[in-house]
């Protein structure tokens, strides 16, 4: 697991909308530090650090540390609530939750697929149909998996990948326990599916035509009997 990112922060004396705006004007991102059986604390973090972390995808729920002036050591935390500016697209408020080895949280873990070139189905023009891009799990806050990898080696058209294929790390369990849900499938090429659809439509049309002819013949026979 990669080393935890460290964010410098300061207590934020002015709270509320006015205090948050003042922090932003001075180059800080306002936030709140909470959890861990301690009172919530209004903080502010360096915009440069937060923006860089956001652009590199590191403000997702993963272990980080807060460097608080005047306190010994660095507090382990997890980013939990990020507010984004509607126009600029950058963080304007970030909440961090204090955690320990005993803390367990529910978190979404991204999935990644490897060895696509080793999949016979993809070689034959099949398509990787991703049903779930993330998997919800319960995990220790200090040992959150970075990603779940799925090996596509040997998979052919029609094969499926299920959550049971994940080798869950110790202490990590899927939120959904009542079924072995699908992560992805190897689907047939669109041209094959289209041809199949056309054949089905043709068969349906032939069947409808045959039924129409039978109905017409039956009406003719009934009319002859009446005459």
Image: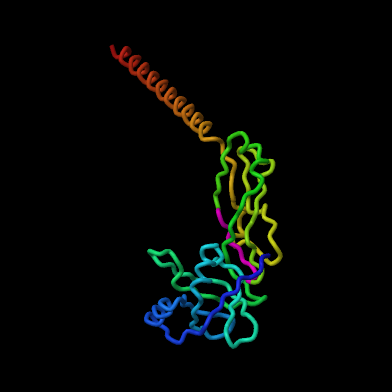
* Of residues 213 and 87, the one drawn nearer to the viewer in this rendering: 87
Quadrant hosting residue 204: top left
Name the residue rendered at 51%, 65% in the picture.
Answer: 54
Name the residue rendered at 35%, 18% in the picture.
Answer: 216
Magenta-drawn segment: 133-141
Q: In this view, does 6 lie to the left or right of 86?
A: right
Q: In this view, does 16 lie to the left or right of 1?
A: left
Name the residue rendered at 63%, 48% in the picture.
Answer: 161
* Of residues 19 and 177, the one drawn nearer to the viewer in this rendering: 19
* Of residues 152 and 170, the one drawn nearer to the viewer in this rendering: 152
x and y percentages locating residue 129 in the rendered image:
55, 44
Residue lying at the far left of the rendered structure: 227
* Of residues 12 and 199, the one drawn nearer to the viewer in this rendering: 12
Quarter of the figure that contains the N terminus: bottom right
Q: Is residue 194 above or below residue 213?
A: below
Does 9 appear in magenta? no
Q: Main secondary structure of the magenta part?
A: strand
Q: In this view, does 213 lie above or below 134?
A: above
Quadrant hosting residue 158: top right
x and y percentages locating residue 209 in the rendered image:
40, 21
| Count of marks overlaid on the render | 0
Q: Is residue 172 above or below residue 117?
A: below
Colouring mode (rainbow / by chain / secondary structure / one colour): rainbow
Does 134 appear in magenta? yes
Q: In this view, does 216 lie above or below 23?
A: above
x and y percentages locating residue 17 in the rendered image:
38, 79
Quarter of the figure that contains the C terminus: top left
């Amino acid at each position: 697991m990669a080393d935890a990112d460290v964010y410098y922060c300061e207590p934020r004396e002015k709270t509320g909308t006015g205090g948050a705006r003042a922090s932003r004007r001075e180059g800080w991102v306002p936030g709140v530090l909470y959890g861990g059986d301690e009172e919530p604390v209004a903080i502010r973090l360096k915009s440069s650090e937060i923006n860089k972390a956001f652009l590199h995808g590191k403000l997702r729920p993963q272990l980080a540390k807060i460097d608080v002036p005047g306190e010994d050591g660095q507090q382990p935390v997890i980013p939990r609530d990020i507010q984004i500016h509607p126009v600029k697209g950058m963080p304007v408020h970030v909440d961090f939750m204090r955690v320990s080895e005993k803390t367990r949280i529910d978190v979404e873990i991204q999935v990644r697929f490897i060895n696509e070139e080793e999949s016979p189905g993809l070689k034959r023009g099949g398509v990787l149909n991703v049903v779930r891009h993330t998997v919800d799990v319960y995990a220790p806050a200090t040992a959150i998996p970075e990603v779940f990898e799925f090996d596509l080696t040997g998979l052919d058209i029609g094969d499926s990948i299920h959550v049971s294929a994940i080798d869950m790390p110790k202490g990590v369990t899927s939120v959904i326990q009542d079924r072995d849900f699908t992560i992805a499938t190897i689907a047939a090429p669109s041209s094959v599916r289209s041809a199949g659809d056309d054949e089905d439509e043709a068969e349906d049309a032939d069947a409808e035509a045959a039924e129409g002819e039978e109905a017409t013949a039956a009406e003719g026979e009934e009319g002859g009997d009446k005459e």
